[in-house]
Image (spheres, rainbow, N blue to C red):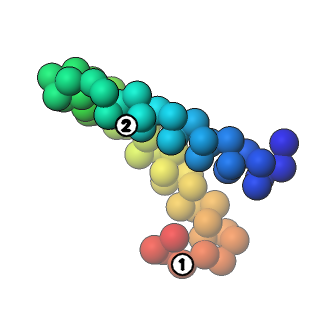
Amino acid sequence: MDYLSELSSKGKNAKQAGRKLATLSTAIKNQALVSMADALEEKCSIILAANAIDVENGKGKGLSDSL
């Protein structure tokens, strides 16, 4: 699958998910947000380590620190 097709597919999926999310109660949406926050906190060290690798790879390719 080429990038354009992949982006288009992801966009369509996001639009469908947005429609479904709009019908959920506030309590369910809040619980989903809490669950996502918990997962991010749980995986924080893994995420930061992967980010550090990405930053180093970017520097090796001449990208600025902001990228």
For residue 64, the mark is: 1
Quadrant in which residue 62 is drawn: bottom right
Between 15 and 28, the one nearer to me in the picture: 15
Residue 20 image offset from top left, x and y in percent:
40, 28
Residue at screen point 42% across, 37% down: 18
Between 12 and 31, the one nearer to me in the picture: 12
Q: Are marks 2 and 1 in contact (CB under 8 Å)?
A: no
Measure the alpha-carbon separation of dots 2 and 1: 23 Å
Residue type marked 2: Ser
Tag 1 secondary structure: loop
Residue at screen point 49% across, 53% down: 52
Residue 49 image offset from top left, x and y in percent:
46, 44
Residue type marked 1: Ser
Q: Residues within 10 Å of mark 2 (few under 14, many from 20)?
A: few
For residue 28, the mark is: none
Residue 55 image offset from top left, x and y in percent:
53, 61
Residue at screen point 54% across, 78% down: 64
Quick one: label 2 or label 1, which is nearer the N terminus?
2
Q: Is residue 23 shown left or right of residue 50?
A: left
Residue at screen point 50% across, 41% down: 15
On the question of residue 43 being in view, the answer is no
Residue at the farthest left position: 27
Residue 14 image offset from top left, x and y in percent:
51, 40
On the question of residue 29 being in view, the answer is yes
Q: Residues within 10 Å of mark 1 (few under 14, many from 20)?
A: few
Between 50 and 9, the one nearer to me in the picture: 9
Residue position for label 2: 45
Q: Is residue 61 shown left or right of residue 34?
A: right
Above or below for 62 versus 37:
below
Above or below for 31 versus 50:
above
